[in-house]
Image (cartoon, rainbow, N blue to C red):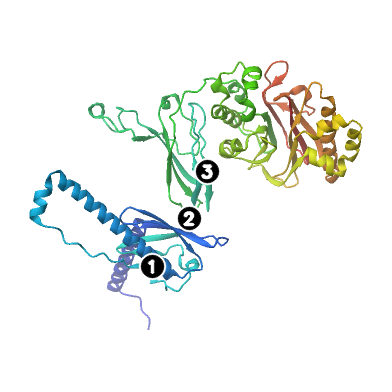
């Protein structure tokens, strides 16, 4: 007959459970204390990579075929470990010889030479769930997440495809008062789940937190000393107190479930003084927050390509009032980033965008503020359209060359026939490199709401009436095509001239966030309006 266990039996069970709990806790602590062996294994690639640090301090990065038997990989690891041990022993011997040569040689001779220890390959094994993995198992199946690699007396926890940074870079030019946005790319992770921590240099002679003033004055801190800024976000905005100091960023990639190996990078140059109050600062007072879901804020801006800013004509004729440093790309990028991010826009259409500026400057800066972008190159520069990821998803993207479309698309047959009546005008038009960047977006809140954003940069000249008429007809033709394919679409346009946008040309009824500039012109156009179903928005600047 079954009976309830007595008190003594319960005490024994409790003691066993307690011992098991302690053993499990010790095991977890041991696993946490293990070194890492990071394995990157992607099905589409023939090789896997294995990274780990040996006991001698050297770091190994190995590339092995996924279809290779495990035994060959373990044998190679053993050979590398033996070589590392030999190098460490040789370095140690050289240090001793230098020490003996500086005064301890006699004592060493009296003691006699040390016996040389015979080096042998360490035992290298791979375990999974506390069982050794057979050496004939293929690498692709052997290196599992949670396995344990043993090299001699050292054990490594195998992490297969942990979150990792494939690219991490700080901008070269950093100014006080302007956001610093690192350029980064992740694999098996996302920036939202990653951890960022910013540091700045400690000024020579300054006291670290917790040090007394007497201690600080009695010794100087090394130039590599760092102190935390207190900012644990992806973007850091240096203050005036940071001027003259370099910055350091420690990043730990994550994916919401685990973290990968951390990386650190330091700025090349120290923080420099900013220009003070900028013309766009007062406009930012009207755009402090992102709009509600039922509204969109649109910005269009010609940001002046570096290839046009660095010519002699630009320096002496177009912008003679600008100091040389103000036309430098590194300096202007800081201003462009701060201005664009301060508008908290949902749609941003940019013209004259250098390819490197898009990938190295605009994407890191605007991505950190929730925007994603697409790019279309022309010749030396191109177009970029950014949209807020929390409000829109990109359904499709269409890049159209005006010259190619005019010659091959039946849509423009009538326009081409009219141009052919004037060969000189036709030649001028076909020489233009204008392109049209079309992005079809869908609301993340209501899939029935879509918006088509058309971004372009058109040729303009005071005497180029034919080109202006052609540009207008070209855009209208595509507007009619989109409207006919999606009958519910209606067209709106945002027009600018010579890098500035004229509010008098806008043909939409909406609320202006701000207005500034001379004679009704503004350096960038910012509009706030309700989201409507199936809307086409044309944004274009005229190139003088």
Mark 1 — residue?
75
- When the figure is inspected, residue 346 is found, relative to residue 61, above or below; the finding is above
Mark 3 — residue?
184
Residue 495: image location, x then y, percent: 76, 28
The quadrant of the image that shows the N terminus is bottom left
| Of labels 1 and 3, the one closer to you | 1
Q: Residues within 10 Å of mark 1 (few under 14, many from 20)?
A: some
Q: Nearer the viewer, residue 446 or 481?
A: 481
- When the figure is inspected, residue 400 is found, relative to residue 524, above or below; the finding is below
| Residue 220, numbered label | none
Query: Left or right: 453 with respect to 364?
Result: right
Q: Quadrant of residue 197?
A: top left
Mark 2 — residue?
162
Residue 336: image location, x then y, percent: 59, 29
How many angstroms separate mark 3 from mark 2 (CA)?
16 Å
Q: Is residue 137 visible?
A: yes
Say which element carries label 1.
helix
Q: Residues within 10 Å of mark 3 (few under 14, many from 20)?
A: some
Question: Which of the two discs, 3 and 2, labels the residue nearer the N terminus?
Answer: 2
Query: Left or right: 403 with respect to 267?
Result: right
């Amino acid at each position: 007959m079954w009976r309830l266990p007595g008190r003594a039996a319960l005490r024994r069970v409790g003691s066993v459970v307690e011992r098991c709990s302690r053993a499990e806790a010790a095991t977890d602590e041991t696993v946490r204390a293990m070194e890492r062996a990071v394995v990157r294994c992607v099905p589409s690639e023939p090789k896997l990579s294995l990274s780990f640090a040996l006991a001698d301090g050297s770091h190994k990065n190995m590339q092995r075929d996924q279809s290779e038997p495990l035994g060959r990989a373990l044998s190679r690891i053993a050979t590398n470990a033996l070589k590392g041990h030999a190098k460490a022993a040789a370095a140690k011997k050289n240090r001793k010889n230098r020490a003996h040569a500086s005064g301890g040689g006699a004592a060493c001779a009296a003691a006699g030479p040390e016996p040389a220890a015979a080096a042998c390959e360490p035992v290298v094994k791979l375990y999974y769930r506390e069982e050794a993995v057979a050496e004939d198992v293929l690498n692709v199946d052997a290196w599992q997440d949670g396995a344990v690699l043993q090299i001699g007396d050292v054990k490594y926890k195998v992490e297969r495809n942990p979150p990792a940074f494939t690219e991490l870079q700080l901008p070269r030019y950093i100014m006080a008062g302007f956001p610093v946005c690192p350029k980064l790319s992740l694999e098996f992770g996302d920036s939202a789940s990653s951890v960022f921590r910013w540091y700045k240099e400690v000024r020579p002679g300054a006291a670290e937190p917790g040090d007394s003033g007497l201690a600080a004055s009695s010794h100087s801190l090394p130039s590599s000393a760092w102190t935390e800024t207190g900012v644990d976000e992806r973007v850091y905005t240096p203050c005036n107190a940071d001027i003259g100091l370099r910055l350091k960023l420690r990043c730990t990639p994550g994916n919401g479930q685990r973290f990968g190996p951390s990386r650190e990078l330091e700025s090349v140059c120290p923080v420099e003084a900013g220009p003070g109050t900028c013309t766009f600062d007062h406009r930012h007072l009207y755009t402090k927050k992102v709009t509600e879901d039922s509204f969109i804020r649109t910005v269009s801006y010609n940001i002046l390509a570096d290839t046009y800013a660095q010519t002699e004509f630009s320096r002496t004729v177009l912008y003679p009032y600008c100091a040389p440093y103000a036309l430098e790309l590194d300096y202007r990028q800081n201003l462009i980033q701060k201005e664009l991010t301060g508008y908290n826009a949902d749609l941003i259409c940019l013209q004259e965008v250098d390819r490197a500026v898009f990938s190295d400057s605009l994407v890191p800066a605007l991505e950190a503020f929730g925007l994603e972008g697409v790019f279309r190159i022309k010749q030396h520069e191109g177009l970029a359209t950014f949209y807020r990821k929390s409000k829109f998803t990109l359904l499709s993207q269409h890049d159209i060359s005006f010259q190619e479309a005019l010659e091959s698309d039946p849509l423009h047959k009538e326009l081409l026939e009219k141009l052919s009546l004037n060969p000189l005008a036709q030649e001028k038009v076909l020489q233009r490199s204008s392109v049209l960047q079309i992005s079809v977006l869908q609301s993340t809140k209501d899939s029935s709401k879509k918006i088509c954003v058309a971004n372009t940069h058109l040729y303009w000249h005071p005497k180029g009436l034919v080109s202006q008429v052609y540009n207008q007809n070209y855009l209208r033709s595509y507007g009619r095509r989109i409207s006919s394919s999606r009958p519910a679409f209606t067209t709106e346009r945002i027009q600018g001239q010579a890098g500035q946008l004229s509010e008098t040309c806008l043909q939409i009824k909406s609320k202006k966030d701000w207005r500034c500039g001379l004679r009704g012109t503004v350096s960038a156009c910012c509009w706030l309006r309700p989201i409507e179903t199936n809307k086409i928005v044309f944004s274009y600047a005229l190139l003088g």
